[in-house]
Image (spheres, rainbow, N blue to C red):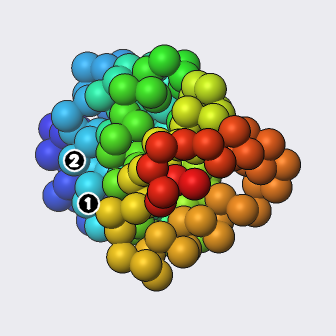
Amino acid sequence: YLRRAVFEAPGGMRQTALTRLLKIKAPDALFDLLKRIVQSNDERQAVLALEALSSLREERVIDIMLEQLSRGNATCRQLATNYLQQMDTAVLVKRRGPMLEMLAEGDDSSRRILLEILLSGGERKDVICEILLHCKNLLGWVRTRILDTLMTFGDDVLRPAVNLLGHDDDEVR
């Protein structure tokens, strides 16, 4: 009954149904339902679902959080940011490719958060090199947006980037 009520009940009763359902069952048992709620248009329910998913430290949640980082409302973005910043860097390194692709999307704040997460996962020089190699295949204005955001990190990026002046690729130099 509660599963149906989450989607079919009128207005505020949906949130009540979701809250009761989360008291009865653990978030991992409701993963598919919570994922569907996050992807729905009900922002208040999406926040509740993301809060529940935040308790799971699993790789399958990372993709949901990355999507919310670029497409969610302010509260969802904050929840996603907190979740991703608390994840083990080894797990995030596996998602580096999709995260690099996301740099070309969204707004400046999402791009900055993605760059913070990318830079926290691994040797900075190597991460910066990977970002620059990715950027060389993008349109000029998109590349400029990413590089402008990268420059806001100041010495945290400048010092490791100096080592790349001897890189084989002209675009990276």
Numbered tag placed on residue 40 in the rendering: 1
Q: Quadrant of the N terminus?
A: top left
Disc 1 to disc 2: CB gap under 8 Å: yes
Indicate left or right for 11 with 6 as reference: right
Answer above or below: position of 92 versus 154: above
Q: Measuring 49% from the left and 24% from the top, which residue is drawn there? A: 55
Q: Secondary structure at mark 1?
A: loop
Does the rendering let one see residue 131?
yes
Of residues 169 and 1, the one nearer the viewer is 169
Answer above or below: position of 48 versus 7: above
Residue type, numbered disc 2: Arg
Numbered tag placed on residue 36 in the rendering: 2
Residue 73 at x, y percent in the picture: 49, 66
Q: Measuring 26% from the left and 20% from the top, which residue is drawn there? A: 29
Residue type, numbered disc 1: Ser
Answer above or below: position of 20 versus 172: above
Q: Measuring 31% from the left and 20% from the top, which residue is drawn there? A: 28
